[in-house]
Each structure stands twice: as structure tokens, then as C-alpha cells.
Amino acid sequence: MQKEARKNDFSQGNIPSTIARMAVPLIAAQLINVLYSVVDRIYIARIPHVGLTVLAGVGLTFPIVTLISAFTALAGQGGAPLFSMARGEGQDERAGRIMGNSMLMLLFFAVFCTFTGYLVKTPLLRLFGASDDTLPYAQDYLNVYLLGTPFVMAALGMNPFINAQGFTRVGMMSVLIGALTNVALDPLFIFVFNMGVKGAAVATIISQALSAAWTLAFLTGRRSLIRLRLSLMKPDFPLMGRIASLGLSSCTMSVTESLVQAVCNASLGQAGGDVYITVMTII
């Protein structure tokens, strides 16, 4: 434990080498994360007897999925910098409370996004350009994906707290576990179990559940320099406000990205129908 603490004491050592040690796993994690989207599209496009309409249906869900990631960024990207600053000031208890309150926010957002998603998914999909042909596929995907929102938020929202402690390889492993699981389970659920687009969503939430389990197991385990504990998860609303204010920029970027995707799909649907949306999904 003391060895890990000395290794991850950012006030010591050579700055360029520390940046390189931190950056390489983070870059690798981003590249690995792309596999989630790429692999899903490869397998979904090959579902027999449905044509490429199914790919357009899944593409129409992207703005909603991106909105979920916006709420994740609000808590995770907002809490991690505050956590790092408190840790640098030697205020480990405050850092623990920041992490605990970020987790509380993620749990609240997960419940909110899941229930709200089920209530508004159909009118939103119609607004985003869903046709009578693509709507069933988009609904099938979202009906399953929304159930996994807590796993998605825990995995993506709490992983920055691992990186903030200097364990970027551990953070990379969280992403790698999810990506490899998704690659393995996609063909199983889509083709072997004949679940089609629902199978792609099931594979995604199982992979995210494993990533979340890895992330939370580390943060509550002995290797974590500052552990996630229930005693530090008491609601502190001023602190939550500070977390949200710092995460607002990342959240806003995701929201605007979602709007761009939605407007693009709706415009393409009017201009060229489902074929144009399918092309954009592939791109």
C-alpha cells in the first residue's frame, strides 16, 4: 500500500515521464472503447433476413445513449478533478466524500434516465427520424439497453477516480474487460441464441456490468489509495453542486453531440429515408 502511494505521489518524480506513464494507458483505453461501437455495427449489419434497416434502427438510438453519457460525465468528470485536488492537498477524507457523492449522483441519474427513457423513448425516436420500419428495432435495442444504465454509469462514471489515483492501467483494464466481453458475446446472443438486435444490447449491458464490477471492486478494495465507503456516501448537496458545476462543460459537450446526431438523423431521414440513416450509422 505504501509502495503504491509513493509510486502514485504526483508531487514526486519526473513530470514528462509521469505524464507518459499516465497517458499511454488512457489513450489505449479510448481506442479500445471504440470497439464497443464498431463490433456492434459489424454483427448487427449481418443479422439475417432483416436487411440494413436494423442498422438504421440502432443508429437512431445513439442520441439517447449519448444523453445518458452526458449525465455520467456530469458526476464522473466533475467529481474526479475535485477528488484529485483534495488528494493533492492531503485532504483524503474530503476526497473520499467527493467520490462517495459522485457515486450517489450516478445512482440517482441512473434511476432517472432509466425511467424517463422508457417514458419518452418512442416519441423521441419518432422525432429523431424513426420510420415504421426502423422504430421496432430501435425500441428493441433501447428496451434492453436502458436496463443496463446503472452499469454503464458506474463503469464510465467511476473509472476516472481510478485514473485520478494514478492507476491508469487498472482503468484501462476496466475498458478492456468490457470490450473483449462484448466481442465474445455479440455473436453468441445475436446469432446462436437468435436474439437479433436485442442480443447486441444484452451483450453490451453484460460487458458494462463486468466493467462496473471491476471498477467498484478496485475502488472498494485494498489497492485503492482512497476507498469508496458507505460512510462517505452521505449526501452533501453543496458538494454535489460543486461537482455538477465542474462537470457541466463535459455534460454540455455530450448534450450538444446528442443534438447534432439527432438533427442529422432526422434530416437524413427526410432527405433519403432509412438508407441515408444507415449510411451515417456505418460512418
Image (cartoon, rainbow, N blue to C red):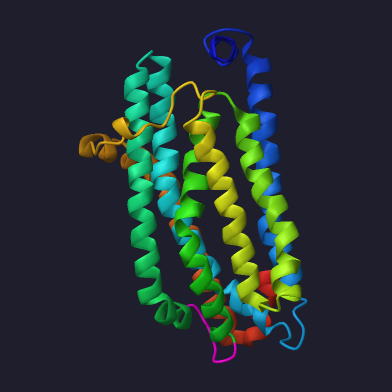
- Whether residue 120 sits left or right of residue 238 in the image: it is right
- The span shown in magenta is 128-133
Verify whether residue 29 appears in magenta.
no
Q: Nearer the viewer, residue 144 or 11?
A: 144
Quadrant of the image occupied by residue 48: bottom right
> What residue is at 33 percent from the left and 46 percent from the top?
105
Q: Is residue 159 in view?
A: no
Q: Is residue 89 left or right of residue 272?
A: left
Residue at horizontal 37%, vertical 45%? 248
Q: Is residue 214 above or below residue 57?
A: above
Q: Quadrant of the N terminus?
A: top right
Residue 79 at x, y = what percent? Answer: 39, 35
Q: Tell me, yes or no, whether the highlighted magenta stretch contains residue 131.
A: yes
In this view, 101 is above or below 32: above
Q: Residue at x 60, y 66 (%)?
A: 202
Farthest residue in the top direction? 12
The single residue placed furthest to the bottom in the displayed view is: 132
Residue 275, position as x, y percentages in the image: 68, 84
Q: Quadrant of the C terminus?
A: bottom right
State the image quarter where residue 50 is shown. Answer: bottom right
Count of picture labels: 0
Image: 237 above or below 189: above
- Percent x, y for residue 46? 78, 76
Position of residue 262 measured from the top left corner of the image (x, y, whole percent)? 50, 71
| Residue drawn where x is 69% and y is 65% of the image | 40
Instruction: Kindly report the secondary structure that dominates the magenta region of the rendered protein.
Output: loop
